[in-house]
Image (cartoon, helix red, strand yellow):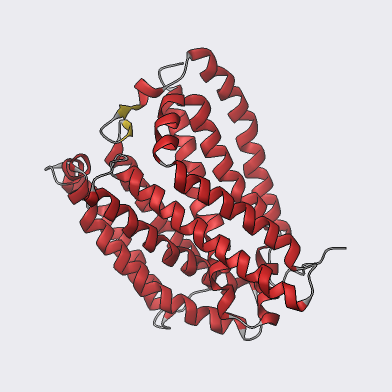
Amino acid sequence: METWLPYFFVGVIGLALLLYVILDGYDLGVGLLLPFAPAAEQDRMVASIGPFWDANETWLVLGVGILLVVFPQAHGIILTSLYLPATLMLIALVLRGIAFDFRIKAGEKHKRTWNALFSLGSLVAALCQGWMLGAYITGLDDSPLSLSFALLIALSLPALYVLLGALWLMGKTRGELPAKALTWARVAWLPMGFALLLISVATPLVSDTIARAWFTFPRALVLLPIPLLTLYCYGWIGAALHGRVQAKPQRIFFMVAAICLLAALGLAYSIWPDIIIGRMRILEAVAAPKSLMFTFVGVVLTLPMILGYTVFIYRIFRGVEVKQAYE
């Protein structure tokens, strides 16, 4: 059993982080969009994510927790190299949580301050997550080229989150706000596509491992559907946002999620069988067999609970205009 458990845990970590990017991505995107709306609409924007955002962040905790227990050596290297952005991200997420609760209890004067802090926390968290992803793809290298690549992804990830957040608002609100959200989505669509193009070009340049994985025949031919499907999804999203294709916001949201899934599959192929590109393989980083079995039992019990809770929350609060109030 110990032979396949490490790969099982890698799959769970990948799933958890993918779901985090998609689910927490839209509520980070709502936070990024908050300064562009008037006060009355800001309340409705925050209310639209109110029942969900705590559950969304659970996936990050699950992924990092499994990494710590199952791959302690890799966890130590990754967190040591990314200590500053990881710390800033956690501070930003805590700031968002505080601002989320305090803004609804504050008077109008102080609510503006808490709204600004909520947006600031969303921006810092998005930038830090992009930086960590870029640094990880380059094998945690600290060369100028690798740092420039990390900066590129740090500046690109907020565009994805803004698009997800705008699509969420289009499907969860009424009145004039969905029309404004459509405009925000159209604005974010082009930068996101430009960022995808730059990242696709830059990734093999900064990582020889990824270049060999993608541009060696016949593997390049087998992998061709990933970029082609990504291009199709991106073009379809643009057509839907500009009225050339009739589609509900939920369907467009799922197409953006499909791009995230395709990117995750591409990244998984690029780094396999390493857990840190060019530095450590999965089987080199794995913990003792007893730790694997103990964690396996915990994950088997916990993962269905988290999935069930997530489905339950989204089902209970389906529809639009969730009212937010605290006594």
Residue 183 visible, this angle: yes
Quadrant hosting residue 307: top right
Estimate the x, y position of residue 251 in percent, counting from the top left: 50, 67
Residue 82's image quarter?
Answer: top left
Residue 317 visible to the viewer: no
Residue 68 point in image, percent of width and height = 51, 29
Point 36% across, 67% down: residue: 192
Q: Please give left or right for residue 43 compared with residue 299 in the image.
A: right
For this orientation, the residue located farthest to the left is: 217
Q: Residue furthest bottom?
A: 176
Q: Residue at x 59, y 53 (%)?
A: 93
Judged left or right of residue 12, residue 156 is left
Q: Nearer the viewer, residue 60 or 119?
A: 119
Q: Quadrant of residue 2?
A: top left
Quarter in which the C terminus is drawn: bottom right
Residue 106 is situated, as x and y percent measured from the top left of the image, at: 78, 70
Picture layout, residue 200 above or below residue 164: above
Q: Is residue 166 left or right of residue 262?
A: right
Q: Is residue 171 left or right of residue 219?
A: right
Residue 20, relative to residue 44: is it above or below?
A: above
Residue 108: x and y in percent read 76, 78
| Picture residue at 51% right of the left edge, 50% below the top | 88
Report the number of numbered marks: 0
Using the image as rendered, state which of residue 121 and residue 28 is in the foreground: 121
Which one is nearer the viewer's eye here, 108 or 322? 108
